[in-house]
Image (cartoon, rainbow, N blue to C red):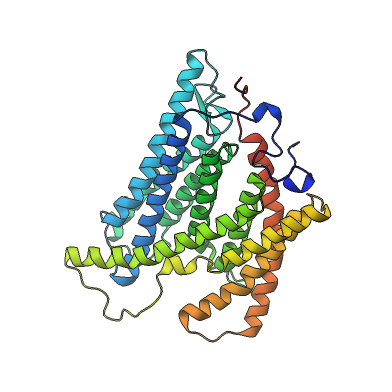
Amino acid sequence: MTTTLPFDGAGPSGTAGLSPAVKISRSGRTGPLAANTVLAGTLTSLLGISWDIQWHNDVGPDTFFTLSHLMLYAGSAIAGITSLAMVLVATAAQRAGRSADHLTGGRPVRVFGGVFRAPLGYLVAGTGAALFLLFGLLDLWWHSLYGFDAVLDSPPHIGLFVSISITMTGSVIVFAASRDTAWGRNGLILSIPVLITFSPITTRAFGAIPLPVEPELLGNILLSTLLLIMGTLVIGRARTALAIGVTLGATQLVLWWFSPWAAHAYAHATGLPLRDNLSDEAPELPSDIPMFMLLAAATAAALLWLGRKRGWSGRVAPQIMGAGAGTVLGATLPVQSTLLEGSPLDMADLLTTTAAGAVTGVLAGFLAARLAVLLREHSTAPAVKDH
């Protein structure tokens, strides 16, 4: 991998580190329209799952055909159909003897021995949507066997969550491939918080593993720190970390209002009562999002600035950024739980999670740097610059 990271003198430019072959002029409208449609699909799925989780908590078990489920599936369908359309456009260009390299969405990939030509990001997003459909059928069968859905961690649900995460990852790749444009950078700054928001749901699958620190908490720290640093390094600007932190906070506020409102409004519309023992608790999914992410982002941005000023090597600087951001998250997530749940803060647990956050952050920084290199170099299609 030859692409340099911002620590290696690439500078703060959004296209820093790109070779001349991949600095592409993207003046067409198809690229941003398709990318933003996929992003809209992932946002719709996020709203649907937050609504559905709140429905389970405030109203009770549900059947397969509820509005929250339909919203969840509609989002995946939007992203999947758009991805399929872009794959067909790229394939048609190839069969007509035209290069598909000018298309946004990532480097074109040969599928089924060259039968299809798929931009990498849309291939990943479409694959996630297809898997979501398969697990949706499994979920329908699961409901036919057991009726109401009483738990979030059923096998079909875990498959659905992983599938949505894959689609969201495809959206990140699509925007990363167009980071030399304003819409690509803005889309990346929005798509990464969407994936961060969804991460705690997926990590619940590991909740039964006996560890000194809850696996869900470790997974939250790992994925949040990894995605924060990865996005910052892909764009190459220190303020990107702050933008991601602010966007995540805004997403949390929207879900905090939307989730209970949608659950209660739908229950009232369908004549279903709320739970008798319902208390004034924080909405479940929004309360799992790190509330102090902006502080972690500021730490990462400050370390990126310091690393540039002092000439830190790109081999170690991402791990330092990860350790800083992970330490902040490890120290603040227990405080967040105390604030939201009213439970006393255990100082021994706080020290344990802070130390675990630092170690997990180092791993997150290590992985983030390598993923950033992949996105900066191998997600972008080689193309000829406009003259």
Side of 290 relative to 132 (left or right): right
Image quadrant in which you'd find residue 376: top right
Which of 65/254 is in front? 254
Side of 366 relative to 67 (left or right): right
The x, y position of residue 340, in whole percent, is 47, 78
Which of 138/212 is in front? 212
Side of 270 relative to 282 (left or right): left
Against 192, is 3 above or below? above
Which of 146/31 is in front? 31
Q: Is residue 202 visible?
A: no
Q: Is residue 97 visible?
A: yes
- At 78% from the left and 49% from the top, the residue drawn is 314
The x, y position of residue 158, in whole percent, is 45, 56
Side of 380 relative to 76 (left or right): right
Against 156, is 271 above or below? below
The x, y position of residue 39, in whole percent, is 44, 45
- At 61% from the left and 67% from the top, the residue drawn is 295
Q: How many marks?
A: 0
Image quadrant in which you'd find residue 1: top right
Against 191, is 111 above or below? above
User: If the image is split into quadrants, where does the C terminus sit?
Assistant: top right
The x, y position of residue 15, in whole percent, is 66, 38
